[in-house]
Amino acid sequence: MSDFEQFEIDFYQSNYNVSDQNQDYSGRGTTGSVHGSKRGQTGDALQSNASTHPEMHSLSQPYTGQIFQPANASEFPSDNTYPDSFDEEPPLLEELGINFDHIWQKTLTVLNPIKPADGSIMNETDLTGPMVFCLGLGATLLLAGKVHFGYVYGMSATGCIAIHALLNLMSIASVSYGCVASVLGYCLLPMVILSSYAVFFSLQGILGTLLALIIIGWCSLSASKIFTSALAMEGQQLLVAYPCALLYGLFALMTVF
């Protein structure tokens, strides 16, 4: 029993004192005060950040609106505010430079040689009508049994180059090649009428020759009138009409023979 009591005394023996416990509590109080001071500094920092950054404070507030309904619809741009809307785009024919009103006015000017020409309209590089009239001349010659599409386009290009060089030498204002090609192409319309007549009747005779001469004068008079009006070449219509008559005479020879 003595051994057991000695073991029990040794087992429960320790160096723990009440003073150590008081010191421990005092240490914990010191630590708590340190943590409390840190928490106070953190709270002051958050308040200072919230005061300097009000958006952070607004983000922390709960959302009081309704779901799927924006608070202010004016913040989102509507479709009408975009400048590139389809309603403001010009028509496709206008972007391509095709104006049927101007085409009709040029055609009437060619059909009526006495009518004065509008220089602002005639100075445009519109090649829609000339391409149609050249194609119509080739088609009517084809109906008459003459395959001359290459000759029509070849002589048209050569004649436009020659007339363009001549007009630049004669006029003070310069003229573009597209304007010359447009005027000469539109004035080819009477020649298309002659070629259509040759589909049904023969032009190899006195009547055919007279009709071809009238058509040549008609084409050259219309072309010279338009050129003198667009380029302000007063008193030079006959000088411009002569080379134009030579060009349209080649088309008349193809039509008659």
Image: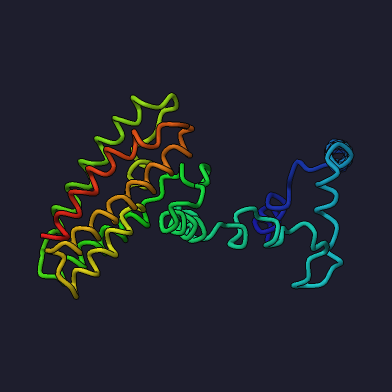
Q: Reply above or below: 68 against 45.
A: below
Residue farthest toward the front in the current orientation of the protein: 206
In the displayed structure image, the side of residue 224 where residue 244 appears, left or right: left
Where does the N terminus fall, quadrant-wise?
A: bottom right
The colour mode here is: rainbow
Q: What residue is shown at x 78% (from left), y 66% (from top)?
A: 70
- Whether residue 139 is visible here, answered yes or no, is yes
- Whether residue 24 is visible here, answered yes or no, is no
Q: What residue is shown at x 58% (from left), y 62% (from top)?
A: 86
Q: What residue is shown at x 18% (from left), y 73% (from top)?
A: 201
Measuring from the top left, give residue 160's x and y in whole percent.
Answer: 27, 41
Q: What residue is shown at x 35% (from left), y 41% (from top)?
A: 180
The quadrant holding residue 111 is: bottom left
Q: Nearer the viewer, residue 20 or 168?
A: 168
Measuring from the top left, give residue 172's x and y in whole percent.
Answer: 43, 24
Count of numbered circles in the view: 0
